[in-house]
Image (cartoon, rainbow, N blue to C red):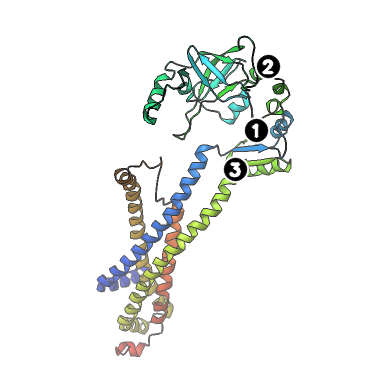
Amino acid sequence: MKFKDKHRFVRSNMKKNRTRVWMTILASTIGCAFLIMLASIGFAIHKTAVDDVMSFRMVNEIQVQKESGMMTENDVKKLEQIEGVKAVTRKKYTPANQLSIGEYNTFANVMSAYMPSEEKAGFELDKGRMPKNKNEIVVGYHFAEELRQDQPENYLEGLSEEEAQKKMKELSYKGKLLNETLTYHLKTDNPDIKIEGPVQTVDVKIVGIGKKPTREWAHDNSVFITEDLYNEVISILGKQDPKIASADELKNYGEVKAFTISADDVKEVTDRIEKLDYMTYSIIKELKQMNVYFTLFKAGLIFIGAIAVLIASIGIFNTMTMAVTERSQDIGIMKAIGATPKTVKRIFLLESAYIGLWGVGLGTLLAYITSYGVNFALPIIIEQFINETPPEGFMLSYIPWSLTAIAVTICMGVTLLSGWRPAAKATTVDVLKALRRDV
């Protein structure tokens, strides 16, 4: 019997019992949709966590530290020679952190950076360029907001938080920072050191402004100076405070990062760095640990969802068992004209598969519609009834293609198993009894 004939036979039989078949399909649809929606919550939480980590750090970034002591120039050179390393960035932090322009002052996080390595690593600017000369600097995106007019200590006294923030914004620098010259005050932050005479200063020019952080709450008012300027600053500060001149944390690097050519190289490069007795930390390590936890979590949700599919399979088993009983005469006729047991079994498995395909198709469609509706409506409901604003990019349900493939495989597998026993029973129908309607 050709497949076309089998299809026609199955289709005509399904039409005879349309109500029962569609109720079975409905059960399969609900089971499949429940499986996908339940697991999609786990996938959404996983995706949110991964996006949270990846938006905060670069994928090809490896933080490097020693077990004891700080990273030196020799350590940096070793890292640069490792195969797969594109750039090694290093930073030193300075205790002098006051900058001003006219009547506006700020205390920023001032650090030195080796600019060629920063460019190779992918340091992004919102405006301007990277420093080329000693007294050129790059400032963070929010530096202007922190550059404020000095006011008395009790200036914000008695104001609410909202009013205080508004007042602080009014005090912030409103002019353009790019290509402006600032005064860098070279004074140690050690309160025990008293400086006689005026504080020495250096004029620095802002040639670049860093890109806005991906996080809304992130506030970047850092200042990047050249290594040549850093050495000059430390030399001046060392004359004010002898401890600065001998401090290892100021001579060596407080932060060293290796950047690989691509994200695929991170694991191999990390292994090479660790063989040199360095400690490493990368987003790949964090994601690996995170993925193990979330894989178990998602597997648990899929297992629970599969129970609903198993319940729906009882309906399929019942429908197919009744179909075999009701069509015993048809089975007898097919056998009488030469149909083999294998052919009979395939016909009933085909009918079971059709029910499963309808259930899986409609269930998947229902799950996607529900997922979209939940992600669209839930933030609105939260804002309206709880008066809270959901986090940026919030989603309760996320359905990747992998989840769809897993759900379809589980549902179709359960459907075929449910139809297997009734189909096997159909092959045992006795021809003579079937034709006498004695079954």
Label ID, residue 294: none
Q: Amino acid at mark 3?
A: Asp
Residue position for label 2: 240
Q: Are marks 3 and 1 in contact (CB under 8 Å)?
A: no
Q: Amino acid at mark 1?
A: Val
Q: Are marks 2 and 1 in contact (CB under 8 Å)?
A: no
Residue position for label 1: 256
Q: Is 405 placed above or below 317 here?
A: above
Closer mark to the observer between disc 3 and disc 2: 2
Horizontal side of 199 relative to 152 (left or right) equals right
Ranked by sequence position, the earlier of labels 3 and 1 is: 1
Looking at the rendering, which quadrant does residue 338 occupy? bottom left
Q: Is 104 placed above or below 356 here?
A: above
At x 41%, y 58%, the residue is 38
Horizontal side of 78 relative to 314 (left or right) equals right
Horizontal side of 356 relative to 91 (left or right) equals left
Q: Nearer the viewer, residue 439 or 62?
A: 62
